[in-house]
Amino acid sequence: MHNTDPNAAAAVADPVIEVEGLAKEYRVFDKPEGLAASVRALFHRTSRAVEAVKGVDLVVGRGEFVALLGPNGAGKTTLLKLLSGIITPTRGTARVLGHVPWERADDFRRRFALVMGQRNQLWWDLPAAESFRLHQEIYRIDPARFEKTRNALVDMLDVRRLILQPVRELSLGERMKLELVAALLHEPEVLFLDEPTIGLDVVAQHTIHEFLRDVQRRRRMTVVLTTHYMKDVAALCERVVVITRGDVLYDGSLAEIVDRFTTHKIVTLDFDEAPERALIERFGFPCEFRGPQVVLRIDRSRIADVLPEVLAAAGIRDVSVEDVPLEEIVAELFRSDTRAHAAAEAGS
Amino acid sequence: MSGGFEAIRPPGRLQGLRTWWTMLKISLEERLVYRGDFVLGTLMRFLPIVTQVFLWTAVFSATNRGDIAGYSRNDIVAYYLLTMLTRAFSSMPGLATSIARSVRDGSVKKFLIQPVDYVSFLLAARVAHKLVYYAVAVVPFGAVFLLCRGYFPPPPPDATTIAAFLLSLALSFLLGFFMEATLGMLGFWFMEVSSIVFGYMLVQYLLSGHMFPIDLLAGVPTGLAGVSLADVVHWLPFEYTAYFSAAVWLGKVQGTQLAWSLGIEAAWVVVMAVACRVAWRRGTRRYSAFGG
């Protein structure tokens, strides 16, 4: 199911991120159980290598908005850390804006930003306005331009009244909005977002989606985002890269993922009153009865033939035909990979 | 190209200094959030000196001698007051542990991602910390020195001595900063540095002159002919964080010896600044390779 095209580099116009065979191995020390074993471990520690990212190839062009998906521990955050230069790889190469990220050149660092949903970059005890001022200095932003950018960003997120309040007094959602403003003041060409909407309510998530989409389009910024919320992906990303166990499992458009990995449609029928089960079950599709409502999963290949027949059933008040939710598709994708992996392990 | 480039001004000659100034101002504001804690902390510092004075009064009355290692009873009180002043410059409470914490909890990442130097940033924050401290401490310090002016030897020091004294204070700040910052950088190698810091504090307490004037070690042999423990300590960095400035004010170090000592102090500042930088480089390299 490897979907990475080796010639992808040529296909992407104006590549901003170019990654080839990138791998990161961590050495973890086993902590043995029990006191005696712990004492022995003082003198002799056993360690093993864990490959968090193994040979990732990826090319991202300017202005793309890419989602990195994968189960916990798949290597998404490790990949973002490699791309932002926090860690050095075990092997492989990466170039972001023409720079090797882990060389951490100031010229590179002035042109990108990383926002982590679970980490603060603002000064905790001071109003965000002070952190913004510091960013103006360290990123060397022209004062007039700084003023303009800051005002535009705080107005887009409607947080102007919050910037003079100490950050520690703000809610998680408010803090996240201000983190985003801080990260975008220097107008980065590349933005890495690590679970930016984690723990936020629906309204805040929605505001942040609108904001990111707007800023990204306006600036033609390249954005790579990791998330567990499919709402983020559906709202923002055209391209999806699925990573499992440190490897790229799928790289393609969001529309294609839905197309390739869904075998059926979800048909919801509303009746005046609860229908007879046999009436629905005779079609032979998996179905679920919820009082006057019935949910059917019908094979995509057969939907055109079957639907008229289904609709002919007496007493139908309303009908809807939908794709399988994205969550389900992705969960299935992760699961099928785990099964394939287990099968391969058993076979070898 | 997107707007990113136009937004960046070419680095002016003073850009680095301006960034530093901004860091200083913001750190000042941050420190002022905790001014109440400062006032209390400052007053608490005067307590140990009272016990020291009682102890030495007892020592003097027991020995019935006019002076010990060249210090009269009054000199000893003046000495302790002066070391307290020096330590207000050289001590760096919480610096090493906060650096180690930033490594452990990952907040040090910010300094890998953003175009800002961690050591300069820490220095700005510490200068701010000290400035706020002095602003609070000037009143109690002034009062104590005024009340205790009788303990100081009568002829006030000349201009050269005062200049050397001030220079030694400034250097002691830098020395204390770079020693503790280097210690904190060990957090890249060890999960917990508090026991290392404790060991350092102990050595520091004994050899800096904080506990007793280093002159007391002049009679302690080292095994080498004609070399006392005090001679060895003069070549170590510790005494420059407490004893030295006090000794300069009291006129115990003069002439070429004074120039030499200032030279040794300045050399240690350079050595520790380089050590700190090297530890940061190696530490971040290790962090990038193993942790993150």
Image (cartoon, coloured by chain):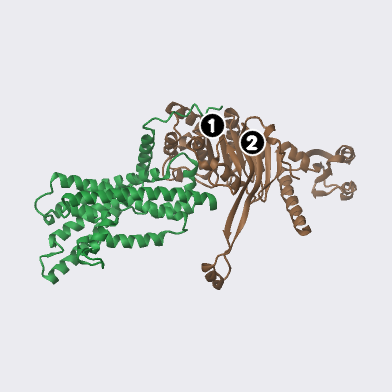
Tell me where residue B272 appears, x and y as whole percent. Answer: 35, 50
Which residue corresponds to the image point at 23% horizontal and 56% vertical from the top-left? B243
Which chain letter matches label 2? A
Which residue corresponds to the image point at 61% horizontal and 39% vertical from the top-left? A224
The answer to whether residue A79 is left or right of residue B201 is right
Q: Quadrant of residue B163?
A: top left
Dot 2 or dot 1, earlier in sequence: 2
Q: Quadrant of residue A273?
A: top right
Q: Secondary structure at mark 2?
A: strand
> Chain A's colour?
brown
Tell me where residue A188 appears, x and y as whole percent. Answer: 53, 33
Which residue corresponds to the image point at 34% horizontal and 54% vertical from the top-left? B93
The answer to whether residue A23 is left or right of residue A160 is right
The residue that label 1 is drawn on is A156
Chain depicted in green: B
Position of A63 relative to B42 (above/below): above
- Packing grade of label 2 (10 A; few <14, some 14-19, many >=20) is many
The residue that label 2 is drawn on is A60
